[in-house]
Amino acid sequence: MERDSFECVSSLDGIYEEEIHQHLQFSSLVKSQNNVVVQENSPTSVHELLECPVCTNSMYPPIHQCHNGHTLCSTCKTRVQNRCPTCRQELGDIRCLALEKVAESLELPCKYDFLGCIEIFPYYSKLKHEAQCNFRPYNCPYAGSECPAVGDIPFLITHLRDDHKVDMHSGCTFNHRYVKSNPREVENATWMLTVFNCFGQYFCLHFEAFLLGAAPVYMAFLRFMGDETESRNYSYSLEVGAHGRKLIWEGTPRSIRDSHRKVRDSHDGLIIQRNMALFFSGGERKELKLRITGRICKEQQNPDGGVCIPNVCS
């Protein structure tokens, strides 16, 4: 079978050891006792040298180079089967120590500066910050598929409504009915997602069936469309019941920074075992009929502690 070829158009084509040496000389001329601050959108070529020509991400040690001086990151070195993507020469195990040293002298703005982050970091600290930056885009919270969409909250709201056809509601209370003809079929997990606009924020109500060990269970939980620190300003309650029995869950909504699976696997929500769910459904227990009610509250800080404000949204 003919193997697929790997082609890479590099932004570093034609840059050899002599040119890298020239860039390093330029760096030594402009560097003072303080660190060099490099704007990522500036014409300076030092940052371009630190960009991997394969994945276009910033390179971190170990930075590899071929005999002709073309560089690439350690992750991409394994992807190109030890062949330089620029000149096709064998890469070997040559480290570009000079370029790694230059990186130590640089300070760069966060790559999310266009979204509002104004922080500047030493080159080797930048990656750690960006992984936790409050301005980084959010992943799509839809749980029924591995959706690759990312963006800010307004973008995700439009995306959920138009692309996933998610139900949108206004208000801080809800009353949902879940019906399933065969409650024993949980191999193909069933997801339901509803978005609520409440207190000027957006919340995702999840309901799904999955196997907890060998036992089918149903779970409902709320996620906040924003960061974790802001999600702590809110609380919610969920209630399900019938025939004189009921289950109640009270908690703090998790941020959508936490993946749907992470929240589910931590059991941070209202969990209903199948036998109890069938009891609430009544009848001959051949069909699942659950009614889940809930309320979203806003915590108001005062000297006496948090106070839950009841539904004030229309």
Image: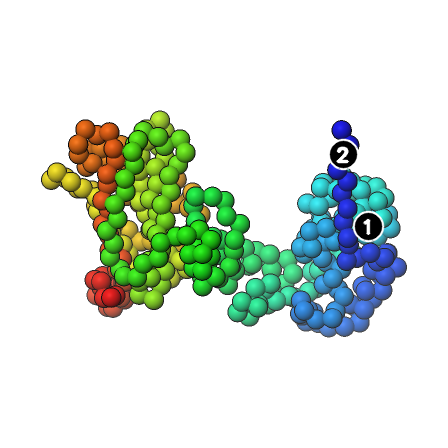
Q: Nearer the viewer, residue 203 or 44?
A: 203
- The residue at 72%/50% (across/down) is 54
- The residue at 12%/38% (across/down) is 243
Q: Secondary structure at mark 2?
A: loop
Report the mark closest to the observer, 1 or 2.
2
> Within 10 angstroms of label 1, few (less than 14), some, or many (20 or more) residues?
many
- The residue at 27%/61% (across/down) is 171
The quadrant in which the C terminus is found is bottom left
Residue lying farthest to the top in this orientation: 214
Is residue 271 visible from the viewing direction of this image? Answer: no
- Going by the numbered disc 1, the residue's amino acid type is Thr
- Vertical placement of 202 versus 275: above or below? below
Q: Nearer the viewer, residue 3 or 179?
A: 179
Q: Nearer the viewer, residue 150 or 183?
A: 183
Residue 202: percent from left, percent from top: 36, 60
Residue 129: percent from left, percent from top: 55, 59
- Vertical placement of 180 versus 110: above or below? above
Tell whether 70 sits left or right of 57. right
Tell whether 297 sits left or right of 62. left
Tell whether 179 sits left or right of 77. left
- The residue at 22%/33% (across/down) is 278
- Going by the numbered disc 2, the residue's amino acid type is Arg
Residue bearing the label numbered 2 = 3
Q: Nearer the viewer, residue 217 or 119?
A: 217
- Vertical placement of 159 versus 1: above or below? below
Q: Secondary structure at mark 1?
A: loop
Which numbered marker is on residue 86?
A: 1
- Comes first in the chain, label 1 or label 2: 2
Residue 76: percent from left, percent from top: 71, 45
Q: CA distance from mark 1 to mark 2?
A: 20 Å
Is residue 50 visible from the viewing direction of this image? Answer: yes
